[in-house]
Amino acid sequence: QSEGLLGPTAIRGLAQQLDLRPTKSLGQNFLHDANTIRRIVRTADLLADDVVCEVGPGLGSLTLGLLPACAAVVAVEIDPRLADQLPRTVAERAPALADRLTVVTADALRVTELPGPPPTALVANLPYNVAVPVLLHLLELLPSIRTALVLVQAEVAERLAAAPGSPAYGIPSVKAAWYADVRRAGAVGRPVFWPAPNVDSGLVSLRRRPAPPGDRAATFAVVDAAFATRRKGLRAALARWAGSPAAADQRLRAAGIDPTTRGEQLSVTDFARLAATPAVLPD
Ligand code: SAM
């Protein structure tokens, strides 16, 4: 492989050297296809001075593709075997770029700060079982992140990028839209991973935009309530959130929303407006 990228032989060799059997619960499916790695880096559209946060660098497949394309990579890896090996792999394969890399051994869901300059981009082949919470956590924690490109399960890609009114629209769609304009950026097949996952994958591209006016936690609370009982109209779905069906009715009407519509119809701005609409207390 050119540019020091990891191909199938190198990936298996590294895994053998570390005596690593990929852990399913940690979503350890490693990229071993240089074309896919180049495609991800190209689609990420990085600037030379970008500081990239990468979650789950694994054996370093994507990290080695990212390092030449940006100023620095801060990689957060939960598995200490992989985190310890990564600087060695980069020193061997891309010695001139090794000082661009910082590795943090941590659960990306629990990080509260990262070392070094604030990341301006997020690029990751995310562990599938925690992809959405990790993405939302980092968008919230790191407002410096301007763009993100993540590889996730195809179905999750569809949900993240879904527009109001479409069948895939749900909690991940609304919450991601709080932070960014979200679009799908292409499908990725199974054979480019080792081991091959039993689901298809997809790229999702996010571009940060100003959050809607309103309070994030209050908006997310009403979103969770609205989608908890998908088949109900909003008046019924939000009864507990508002205190009673009548109170839900009143708040929906005050926010200019028809109480018989379903959560699937509302945009993130609608939810933010609803969350900000005060309850009218009885006389
Ligand atoms: N980036 C590598 C690649 O493309 O080959 C590996 C991607 S693999 C799908 C996901 C990686 O995330 C694994 O290395 C796994 O150990 C790591 N991981 C899983 N859960 C994590 C978490 N909560 N925080 C940080 N890393 C995690």
Image (cartoon, helix red, strand yellow):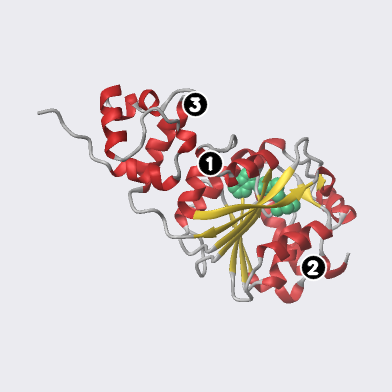
Mark 2, secondary structure of its residue: helix
Kindly report the distance in space between the C-alpha atoms of the residues bearing marks 1 and 2. Answer: 39 Å
Location of mark 1 (residue): 172
Kindly report the distance in space between the C-alpha atoms of the residues bearing marks 1 and 3. Answer: 14 Å
Q: Earlier in the sequence, mark 3 or mark 2?
A: 2
Q: Residue at x 59, y 71 (%)?
A: 50
> What kind of residue is marked 2?
Glu
Q: In the picture, which quadrant includes the N terminus?
A: bottom right
Mark 1, secondary structure of its residue: helix
Q: Is residue 176 above or below residue 98?
A: above
* Foreground of the two, 246 or 150: 246
Is there a contact, CB below 8 Å, between mark 3 and mark 2? no
Q: Residue at x 72, y 59 (%)?
A: 40
Mark toward the viewer: 3 or 2: 3
Location of mark 3 (residue): 230
**Left or right for 66, reference 145:** right
Q: Hey, which quadrant is residue 104 in on the image?
A: bottom right
* Foreground of the two, 128 or 175: 175
> What kind of residue is marked 3?
Arg
Q: In the picture, which quadrant includes the C terminus?
A: top left
* Foreground of the two, 62 or 158: 158
Residue 112 in view, yes or no: no
Mark toward the viewer: 1 or 2: 1
Mark toward the viewer: 1 or 3: 3
**Left or right for 223, reference 182:** left
> What kind of residue is marked 1?
Pro
